[in-house]
Amino acid sequence: DAKTTQPTSMDCAEGRAANLPCNHSTISGNEYVYWYRQIHSQGPQYIIHGLKNNETNEMASLIITEDRKSSTLILPHATLRDTAVYYCIVRAPSSGTYKYIFGTGTRLKVLA
Amino acid sequence: ETGVTQSPTHLIKTRGQQVTLRCSSQSGHNTVSWYQQALGQGPQFIFQYYREEENGRGNFPPRFSGLQFPNYSSELNVNALELDDSALYLCASSLYAGGQETQYFGPGTRLLVL
């Protein structure tokens, strides 16, 4: 029952920008979009989140479309250490609280 | 480093046994969520604890249970282990204050059931 869809895999050349898309067409007005990544079976690492405005931090930028039905995570200068599985998540209500529903994510491979 | 720790890092059990996994949350966080991640899959939500009470549960049977302590650390207990329980178990802590809730994950406990 994942609320997001992402491509299964992507490649990116080292030093280039990596643009990872995510569709979340059923998102509700007050639901945030979160991005995490997981490197080699470590715990998922928080990257960024947003509601409707574009967001930027030291790791990445998040671009959310005006209708909020899709977003793109941008890693501006990908390095080999950015090779990971990237998850786009919309929190879903569950029994009085919210839960993260992870899909299978996008496996990003950064190539030397 | 998220400040979320889990123990043990690895564990081997046999079918039918019981297991307890532990999680220490990040300082200042009052909510702990537990996830199960099978090989090649995304994490699946098990349940969440907020102020020592279960506050939401995923599609897991009652043999998965938990506790949260006054210091907000948490345990996940699994009874009558089955082979399919072999997975990476992740805990995440967060500050639940309505609206936004960013979860920070620990490194996980890898459980193998033989």
Image (spheres, coloured by chain):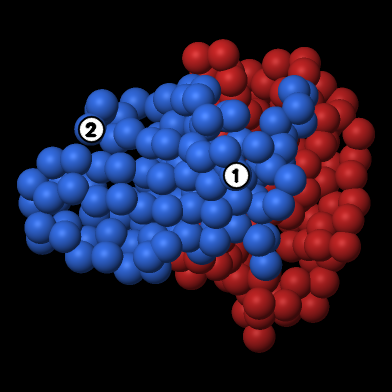
Q: Nearer the viewer, residue A28 or B70?
A: B70
Q: Is residue B112 visible?
A: yes
Q: Secondary structure at mark 2?
A: loop
Q: Is residue A32 visible?
A: no
User: What hue does chain A carry in this figure?
Assistant: red
Pointer 1 or 2: first along the chain: 2
Q: Nearer the viewer, residue A93 or B55?
A: B55
On screen, residue B20 versus residue A57, left or right, reads: left
Q: Nearer the viewer, residue A77 or B63?
A: B63
On screen, residue A56 versus residue A30, left or right, reads: right
Check disc 2 and report the residue beneath it.
B63
The image quarter in which residue A45 lies? bottom right
On screen, residue A11 versus residue B90, left or right, reads: right
The span from disc 1 to disc 2 (Cα, nearest Å) is 24 Å
Q: Position of residue A101 (x, y in %)?
A: 52, 34
User: What hue does chain B carry in this figure?
Assistant: blue
Q: Position of residue A9 (x, y in %)?
A: 53, 57
The image quarter in which residue B5 lies? bottom right
Is A70 placed above or below B29 here? above
